[in-house]
Each structure stands twice: as C-alpha cells, then as structure tokens.
Image (cartoon, helix red, strand yellow):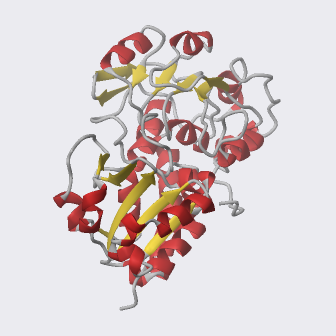
C-alpha cells in the first residue's frame, strides 16, 4: 500500500468506545516506557475475561491459524488491526508506525486518545513494504494480526516463525472494516465485545444516514488524485463500502472503467476522467492547497462533478486517513466532518 499515496482524521471530540468492561481496570495501569514490555501483558493482567478462552481456528488467505491460548502480547501489522485491538481494551505490544496524518511517534490522534485512556502504548515498528521481522520478534508477541495488510505468503511464513499469525481473509488491502473487528474479537476471545463495538458504530452511521435521506440511491465514486495519477477506488474497497453504508450506490462507471490492476483501486488515464460519471465524487486531498489545485486543474474541470460543484472534498491528512478506510476507532472520529462534506456535494433533487 505504500506505493499508493495515502491520501487517506477531524478534531471533533468523541465519546470513547473504549469504555468496555476491561477499560476501567486498564485506566490505572502505568504507562510503559516503550510499550514492548508493558502493553499486552499489562492489559491481560487485570482485565476480566469475556469468558474462558476457547481455542479458535481462523481461516485466511494463506491457510488457517490455530490460537490455543488467550493471547497476552498482540502485535499488529498494517491498517485497522491496531485500532480494533485498542477498541477491545487491549494495547498491542507493537504496531506499524504511520506517517500520513500521524504524529512524530507514528500514531494517529484517535490512537493517542486510546493510549491515554488505557495507560500504555506500543512499540513502534518501522513502516515499509515488508514487516520488520527482527523488530517484531524483539516485541515477543504471542499473536500477530495482519488482517488488513499487504503481506505476501513469504512474509506470512516468516511471521509464523515468530508467533501465530492471522492474515487477511482473501485479498491484500481489501478486508471489510467490520471483518477486521470481528476477526480481532475472535482471535482475542472477545467476540461479544467486538459485536458491541460494531453495534455502537453502526448506530452512529445509521443516525447519520437517517439525518441525510438525500444520500439514498445517489451514485458515488471515490478517487485520490496526485500530480502523476488519478486513482479510482473499486467496489471491494472498504472506503466505498462505508459510503454505501451511508446510503450511496457505487456509480456504474466505476465498474465500467475498471482495469482490475489491484484489489482495491485502479488508475484512470487523464484522457478518460470525464467518463467517470456519478452524482457525487469524493476526492481525498492532503491539504487545502492541493484540493484547490485539483479543483482548478483544466483536466478535472472536464468532469461534470467538478464543473457542477458535486465534489465532496475530504481534506487534511488526519481526516482523510480516518475514512481511508475507516477503522474501529477512526470511523466515528471524523464522521460529522465527512458527512458534512458529502451533504454539501449532493445535487438538489
């Protein structure tokens, strides 16, 4: 995923979803100096178990992973998994450091909030195309979650030499955000808590959709535009699935122009951008300057959405990241900002 610009978080205060039964005990835990010695073990020490842990076997793209004992030290790789772990009241012992929209330590703002509430933070793994195996091994995990990632089978085999590893269910970078949460709950023996996290999120999304009946049935396409390429997100991408949750329908042109070059996006030549028709276009941009450059580019002014002001601009690295794709913690973090941008772009009936 690093090869694609991560034009993909609001400062809106939010009610924490970490107030699960385990969180009360975790709030008093001391902050570990680096996270690799504190996070997982400390989280497991005082938390009341959802139930006696039952061994579970999780199927994924590279086979199956059997988890026979309750994980105490969970490492994550990729996007979404660390937030799902945190939403369940557990601090990973190690997670991939982030760059786009992140702070100097490599954390997103909603993750920092979670660390403050849970009283610990993970060790930061060096980001890259392949996992940093030595760094992961140094964190001594007893489970590795890479449910939304781009690991290869060779990467998976190396990771399994460190600890049982759960990969994505089918294709890299295409796991629905809900499945990231449910799989994490299953792996940690916290399926009931995972269902509650989903129920809370769904309630907020449903409330937003109900407040905007004009979204229902409107066609939509989501794109990321950098100076050298025009990327279109495919229907299998969690970004698009989130838009559908709000009531939108994927524009037929998205499938008609699909080159199937990857599991979650394709590149559209600038000569054909006007063929990407939709009622609303979602455009992700790192900052206002870049958003303005895109809006004023003659190439994109050939698109009806730009010419008729039907573009929902999602601007700012943190805001963009929160919905690109959404996670157990990020989705509601910027929900209001995202929905407001969509509402402003919906054409009048």
| Residue 55 locus on image (x, y percent) | 40, 24
Q: Looking at this view, is 265 or 55 the one in front?
A: 265
Q: Is residue 61 visible?
A: yes
Say which of 57 and 179 sits in front.
179
The quadrant the C terminus occupies is bottom left
Whether 259 is drawn above or below 33: the answer is: below
Instruction: Please indicate whether residue 56 sits to the left or right of residue 75 in the image.
Output: left
Q: Residue at x 29, y 29 (%)?
A: 59
Would residue 247 be seen by someone viewing this image from the given angle?
no
| Looking at the image, residue 158 lies above or below residue 108 | above
Image quadrant containing the N terminus? top left
Residue for point 48% across, 63% down: 294
- In the rendered image of this protein, does residue 336 appear above or below residue 348? above
Q: Nearer the viewer, residue 146 or 231?
A: 231
21 up-or-down from 58: above or below: below
| Snapshot quadrant of residue 273 | bottom left
Is 228 left or right of 83, judged from the image as shown? left
Which of the 4 quarters of the picture holds residue 151? top left
Residue at 61 percent across and 37 percent down: it is 99
**Residue 33 screen position, x and y as percent:** 80, 22
Task: Report whether 188 appears left or right of 263.
Answer: right
Give residue 87's position: percent from left, percent from top: 59, 44
């Amino acid at each position: 995923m690093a090869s694609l610009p991560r034009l993909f978080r609001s400062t809106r205060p939010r009610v924490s979803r970490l107030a699960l039964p385990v969180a009360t005990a975790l709030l008093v835990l001391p902050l570990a100096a680096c996270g690799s010695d504190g996070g997982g073990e400390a989280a497991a020490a005082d938390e009341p178990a959802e139930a006696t842990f039952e061994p579970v076997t999780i199927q994924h793209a590279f086979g199956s992973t059997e988890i026979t004992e309750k994980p105490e030290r969970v490492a994550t790789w990729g996007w979404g998994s660390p937030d799902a772990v945190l939403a369940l009241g557990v601090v990973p012992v190690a997670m991939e450091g982030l760059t786009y929209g992140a702070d100097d330590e490599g954390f997103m703002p909603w993750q920092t909030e979670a660390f403050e509430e849970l009283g610990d933070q993970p060790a930061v793994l060096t980001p890259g195309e392949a996992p940093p195996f030595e760094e992961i091994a140094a964190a001594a995990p007893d489970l590795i979650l890479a449910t939304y990632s781009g690991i290869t089978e060779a990467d998976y085999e190396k990771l399994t030499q460190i600890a049982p590893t759960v990969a994505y269910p089918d294709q890299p970078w295409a796991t629905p955000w809900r499945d990231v949460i449910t799989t994490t709950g299953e792996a940690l023996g916290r399926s009931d808590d995972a269902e509650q996290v989903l129920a809370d999120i769904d309630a907020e999304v449903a409330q937003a959709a109900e407040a905007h009946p004009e979204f229902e049935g409107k066609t939509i396409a989501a794109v990321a535009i950098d100076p050298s390429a025009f990327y279109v997100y495919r229907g299998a991408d969690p970004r698009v699935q989130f838009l559908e949750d709000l009531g939108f329908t994927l524009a037929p042109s998205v499938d008609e122009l699909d080159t199937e070059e990857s599991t979650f996006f394709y590149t559209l030549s600038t000569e054909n951008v006007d063929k990407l028709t939709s009622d609303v276009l979602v455009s992700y941009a790192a900052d206002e300057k870049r958003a303005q450059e895109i809006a004023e580019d003659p190439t994109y002014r050939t698109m009806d959405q730009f010419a008729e002001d039907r573009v929902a601009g999602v601007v700012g690295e943190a805001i963009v990241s929160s919905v690109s794709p959404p996670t157990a913690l990020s989705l509601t973090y910027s929900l209001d900002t995202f929905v407001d941008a969509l509402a402003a772009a919906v054409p009048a009936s």
